[in-house]
Amino acid sequence: MSDLTTAPPSIPVGTGLSMFDPLFLGIDEYGHPVYLPLIYRNILIGGEPGAGKSSLLNTIVGHAALCADVDLVLIDGKQVELGLWKDCADVFVGPDLDHAIDTLERLQEVMDNRYAYLLSQRRQKIHQGDDFDPILLAIDELAFFSATVGTKTEQEYFSALNRDIASRGRAVGIIDASATQRPSSDIIPTSLRFLFAWRFAGRCVDESSSDVVLGRGWAARGFSAASIDPDNRGEGLLLAHGGIPARVKGAYMSNDDIIRVADYAAWTRRTRRTTTTTTAAELGAVA
């Protein structure tokens, strides 16, 4: 017989979203919705300050936070851009290069362990419903960690770790979403850019900066983020491998919107965390 004096535990009602579902990114120039599949892919976001890159990254993190089958690793040089999602994150890193490097090293170890598991199962990638969940690695202000703080050796090591995760992590469900307001060749070398299936160039100061994000030659073909109206924040050129850049207006959440979604997402994730998932255990050493 149940103890009627004990209140039953609350049961958070989730959204039913999965990281295997495409996320709503915004609308195209014809007003049609743009949905972006991120599983097995990475996304690179660049643009001048105020172009809306952090807003787009918040949209991506917000979708992931509402998914029941993804863990969040957030790295934010300014703390405040992704900080509102801190209670949803399995790992949150502020302006601390050592912590950022430790986190990427742990992710690299997780990645290697997952590949060893797939090899033992004679498989090539994870599937929806596997014992371990996808992981979203979101980095806001890539340049802070790769070119601003720490020694040159530390910066290069951070960049090498991020490049390795972007290169090898996709098949084991690690999604790299990196953003920078300094789209220059030293921050986004060609070897890194080619690892991102999706590239979004918000308003850029010149055509060369636009090409750093999208790829060399697009500005000469008439696709330049430097032509975007500086007052039209959130608009950018979205490119997929093998495709043509398309004008997209990114979805926008106000600060209050983010707080509401983040609080709800943290509440729905609370029960899930009490029953430790494989992925949460993998990431626990980094927290």
Image (cartoon, rainbow, N blue to C red):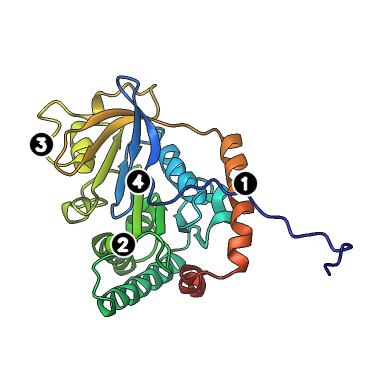
Disc 2/disc 1 C-alpha distance (Å): 30 Å
Q: Position of residue 183 (x, y in %)?
A: 27, 43
- Residue at the image point whose x is 40% and y is 53% from the top: 139
The residue beneath circle 2 is 162
N-terminal of the pair, mark 4 or mark 1, is: 4
Work out which quarter of the rendered image holds the N terminus and state it: bottom right
**Placement of 171 over or under 217, stated as above or below:** below
Answer yes or no: do the residues labelled 2 and 1 have beta carbons within 8 Å? Answer: no
The residue beneath circle 1 is 264
Q: Nearer the viewer, residue 7 or 84?
A: 7
Q: Position of residue 202 (x, y in %)?
A: 32, 33
Q: Using the rendered view, name the quadrant where residue 136 is placed.
A: bottom left
Disc 4/disc 2 C-alpha distance (Å): 14 Å
**Label 4 residue SS:** strand
Q: Nearer the viewer, residue 21 or 217?
A: 21
Q: Position of residue 7 (x, y in %)?
A: 82, 59
The residue beneath circle 3 is 217
Per the rendering, the mark at residue 180 is 4
Q: Nearer the viewer, residue 252 or 13?
A: 13
Residue 60 horizontal side relative to residue 256, left or right:
left
Disc 4/disc 1 C-alpha distance (Å): 28 Å
Disc 3/disc 2 C-alpha distance (Å): 25 Å
- Residue at the image point whose x is 85% and y is 63% from the top: 6
Disc 4/disc 3 C-alpha distance (Å): 21 Å
Q: Using the rendered view, name the quadrant where residue 215 is placed.
A: top left
Residue 126 horizontal side relative to residue 222, left or right:
right
N-terminal of the pair, mark 4 or mark 2, is: 2
Please rate how many residues cluster around mark 4, counting C-alpha atoms within 10 Å: few if below 14, some from 14 to 19, many from 20: many
Q: Position of residue 198 (x, y in %)?
A: 26, 44
Which mark is nearer the camera, 4 or 2? 2
Answer yes or no: do the residues labelled 4 and 1 have beta carbons within 8 Å? Answer: no
Amino acid at circle 4: Thr
